[in-house]
Every structure is written in C-alpha cells, then in structure tokens.
Image: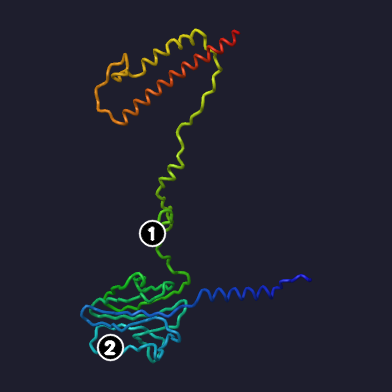
Amino acid sequence: MGKRVVTPGILAALASVLLLAGAAAAGTPSEWHVPLTAATVSSGSNPNLEFGTEAGASDRLDVGIDVPHPPPPPGATLDAHFISADTLFPELDKDYRAPAESIRWTLSVQSSAQAVVLSWDSTGVPADVELRLTGPGLDTNMKAAGNTTLAAGTHSLTIAATWTPGLIPTPTPTPRRDGDEVSDGAGPVAAATPSPSPIAAVSTHTPSTTWTPAASASPTRMPVSTAAAMLTAAPALVATVAPSPTTGATPGVPPAPTATPTPESDGASAAVVAGSIIGVILIVLVAYLALRRRGGAGG
C-alpha cells in the first residue's frame, strides 16, 4: 500500500472548513430594540424615539420598519430625532439598522428653554453587545445607566453598538457546601474547610508517648536466709492485711469514719483484700521455689 501524501490543496481545504466552523460557532448579531425618551420639565417631550437592529433594515427610511419624525409644532422649544441618510426623510423617530458587528446612530436634540433628560431601557440588548452614548463632554455606558441630562442647547450625539462574541459576563457562583469551591464574585477563593468528624478524630489520634518495655534483667538467685525470713513473715502479713472477723477492721490501722456501705465500696474492699492475699501467696511461692532450687544446688 502506498503512502498517503498531504498536499497543499488538502491543507487549504481543511483550513477553510475550520474557518467556516469557527464562524458558525461564533454566531451572528441578533435583533434588539431600545426605546428612548427626550423630555423637559415643562417644555414638551418626545416619548416615541426608538433604535435597534432589524433584519433587512438600512441607514435610510425602511417602510414598515422605521417611523419618520413629524415636524415640530409652531413655537415648540424641544425637538429630538434620529438623523437618516435618506434625503426625502432625513429625520426619524424610530431608526433600525441591519444586525452588524458595529453600528452608529446620530441623535439630534435641540432645546432652547430647559435642560433635557434622555432616558432609555436597554434590558433587551444582548449581553455580548456594548452600547455607548457619546458627545461633547459625554460618554455614557447605556447598559450600565438608564438616563443622562443635557443642558439647554443643540446637541449632536452618537449611539454606538459594538458586537463582541464571548463578551457575556460570568454569572456569580452560588454558595457551596463544605469542601466545595466558593466564590465572592471576583474569583475563586480557598475551598471551605469541612467540619472534622469525631470518628476520624479518634481513629487518627496519635499518642503523645510510646511505651517501650524495659530490657529484662538478668535472673538473680535469692539467698536462703532471705527466703526463710519471707516464709516466717508470711503468716504475719496475712494477719495484718486480712480484716478482723468480728469488726472488719485491720489490726494496727485506725478505724475509718463510719459510712453507709454501698455495693461499689463493698466490691472495692473485697478487691483490695483479694489482691493482698494473692500477693502474700506469690511471696510464699517465690520463697518456696528459691529454697527448693538452693537445696537442689547443694545436693
């Protein structure tokens, strides 16, 4: 089987496909409308202004889409309208353009008596479209503000719409549970520390000290005299530790204050007595073994 060779023509075709796919993924500008009002305190207003994008529209009067601006009545001190490239209808109340990456509208405002307040509603503008109102001494983000005030006089303003794919702001994350990433709106912060588990705390406990058995000592034989003395003293030790059969008191020990006996105290006393007796028995046994070993060594 022969080798397949990638020719420049194939590379160019692949590049074209990738460019088309990227353009399709980016999408196209959408349609949107922004209502706008120009008003004074007592010298009239124009609440019929509107601009935006509409498929098939142009920078001239588009019948069925745009709306011409009627001449102001005699004596009017306020006049506000959009400027069109149409020679027959150069003034529009509603001015729509075809969706595009960059669009400009010209807004004319004239007021000979009072200041003019421009107000608008830009909630219908897509998130990836930037909208600004500019003029002499004026630069307003129309998506961040909803109105602006113009001094009395003649103003020629520009409304600029710029479409930037991917300009959609990142939504604010919702609060998380323990251990989940948390965000304060400006960026991710350290993950919340989960509450420690009591079981884990017990299972992972490390003792502060470690018991190490001592090295065993070398066995030492007990002298016969010592063993004999222990055997002789054993009966006396038993008599000293064992309670008196009549009073329950230990000889040689002052009697303790009288108290109401309880099952717990009775059990503790019995344990002490039993331990003492066992200790005496062990002493006797050790002495006996020592004597026996001594006797075997002497034989």
Return the residue nearer the eye: 261 or 102.
261
On the image, which quarter does residue 108 sit in? bottom left
Q: Which residue in the protein does label 2 denote?
A: 72
User: Which quadrant: the C terminus?
Assistant: top right
Which residue, as the protein is rendered here, is positioned at the far front? 246
Depth check, front residue: 14 or 113: 14
The residue at 24%/78% (across/down) is 40
**Which numbered tag is attached to residue 49?**
none
Chain-order first, disc 2 or disc 1: 2
Query: Could you tell me which residue is drawn at 58 percent across and 74 percent down?
Result: 19
Residue depicted at 39% across the width and 14% down the height? 237
- Residue 57 in the image: state x and y as whole percent: 43, 86
Q: Residue furthest left?
A: 42
Q: Quadrant of residue 87?
A: bottom left
The residue wearing badge 1 is 175
Three-letter residue code for mark 1: Pro
Question: 102 left or right of 299?
Answer: left
Give SS at disc 1: loop
- Mark 2, Cα crowd under 10 Å, few <14 / some 14-19 / many 20+, is few
Q: Name the one closer to the observer, 248 or 166.
A: 248
